[in-house]
Every structure is written in structure tokens, then in C-alpha cells.
Image: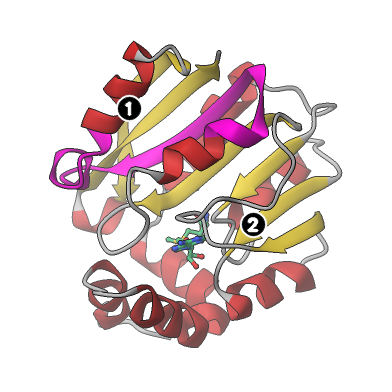
Amino acid sequence: MNTDREILKRVYTAKTKEELMDAYNEWAKDYDTDLSEFGYEAPLESVSKFLKYVSPDQNVIDAGCGTGLVGSMLKEHGFRGIHGLDYSVEMLQVAEGKSVYEKLYHADLTLPLEIEADIYDALICVGTFTYGHVSADAFDSLVKIVKPGGHIVFTVREGAYDDMNYRKKMVQMEHDSLWELKELTDAVYFSGEEITCKVCVYKVL
Ligand SMILES: C[S@@+](CC[C@H](N)C(=O)[O-])C[C@H]1O[C@@H](n2cnc3c(N)ncnc32)[C@H](O)[C@@H]1O
């Protein structure tokens, strides 16, 4: 367990993908316990929004699924056959052990995905648009694999929203008619540290 929160600093200040993956690979086995300790509320808020737009019979993917916290919640709400995607092998191994996902992809969201275009009805991505993680260009990869009319729900950590140009890219994609904003709300990210995030809901056009 990492009660000193050193691990959070490590993932948010990672300078390269390798540094970030080393941190997640080492953290994987303690991740769930630590995040419960840190008051990580982002999955709860995001799943609650997801349920407003997506029904359990739909074909969904959890991008940046990590150890499967989000997938487990979706399963509790009746979702089956969920797909997951992450770039950390060890995080994926923990996720696999939960038997929540029908299929897990080891893939990098910052590169073009080798997944068929327009195959998912909906996508959820929690805790992945933040400092030291994926750039705003990853939004293009997400939109590509979701069907027109499908929904994408994701969090963007406060601060990073502007610092990492997420807001700029999101608005640009609205102007380019790639997606339509349905909801953008502020929510608690880590309750222990009073850190908030945006929970964003888009419809793919
Ligand atoms: C804070 S965790 C969130 C995990 C899970 N969604 C949750 O809420 O518990 C961020 C996840 O993003 C993944 N990640 C970071 N960069 C990535 C990339 N380029 N491609 C795919 N996944 C990535 C990490 O491996 C990690 O599992």
C-alpha cells in the first residue's frame, strides 16, 4: 500500500510513456486498495452519467480500464460482454483476474488503434485524461471506434483541462462536427484532496 501518496505524484509527473507504464505496472497489485484509501470517486460519478445514456444491452468499451474498477461497476449494473483497453500489462492482468471483461486489448490510446471503426455503442474512459497520461489527440481514437449516435463518457482532471489543451481539442471537435456535447459537469475526483474533475458526455456524430 502507498499511504504517502508518492505513487500519485509519480504517475502525474511521468515524463515519458515508459515512466508512466513502469509506475502503473508496479502499482497494479495495490491500486484498488490505495485508491479506495485516497477517496477516488471519479468512477462512481462517471458510471452514474454513463447509465443515463447507455443501456446494459449495448456494446461498450472501457478505455484506460486499469484494474477494472469501472468495468466491475458496470457489471453490477447488468452490463455483460464489456471490452477493456489499457497500455499497462500488469493493470490488465489484475483486470483479467476479476472476470469482468469479455475482451481486453493491450493498446496505446495515443496511437491509432487496431480496432475496427464504429463498432461500439458507447465508451467510458475514467482517470486517463490527466497530467502525465494521454494527450488530447487520443480523443480522435475514441471517436473513431464508437458508432455515430453512440456516447462517450470521460473524466478530465481539473487543471489539466486547460493546461493540457483538453478543452481546446474538445471544442475544436465540436466545431468539426465530430461529436456533440451532451453534458459537462464538475465532480469530485479525489475526495481526500479536494481535487475535482469534469465529467464529459458526448454523442458521436
Ligand atoms: C488512473 S488509471 C484509471 C484506471 C481506471 N479507469 C480507473 O478509473 O480506475 C489510468 C489508466 O490509464 C492507463 N493509460 C495511461 N496511458 C495510457 C495510454 N497511452 N494508452 C492506454 N492506457 C493508458 C494506465 O495504464 C492506467 O491504467
Which residue is drawn at the image coordinates 75% and 22% (left, top)?
55
| Residue 72 seen anywhere in this rendered image of the structure | no
**Mark 1 or 2, nearer chain start:** 2
Q: Is residue 117 left or right of residue 186?
A: right
Residue 81 placement (x, y as % from top left): 86, 45
As measured in the structure, the alpha-carbon distance from the residue carrying label 1 to the one carrying label 2 is 21 Å
Q: How is the image coloured?
A: secondary structure
Residue 167 placement (x, y as % from top left): 24, 31
Mark 2: secondary structure: strand
The region drawn magenta spans 143-167
Q: Is residue 135 left or right of residue 74?
A: left
Magenta residue check for 174: no
Residue nearer the viewer, 62 or 193: 62
Residue 170, disc: 1
Kind of residue sitting beneath label 2: Leu
Kind of residue sitting beneath label 1: Met
Residue 85, disc: 2
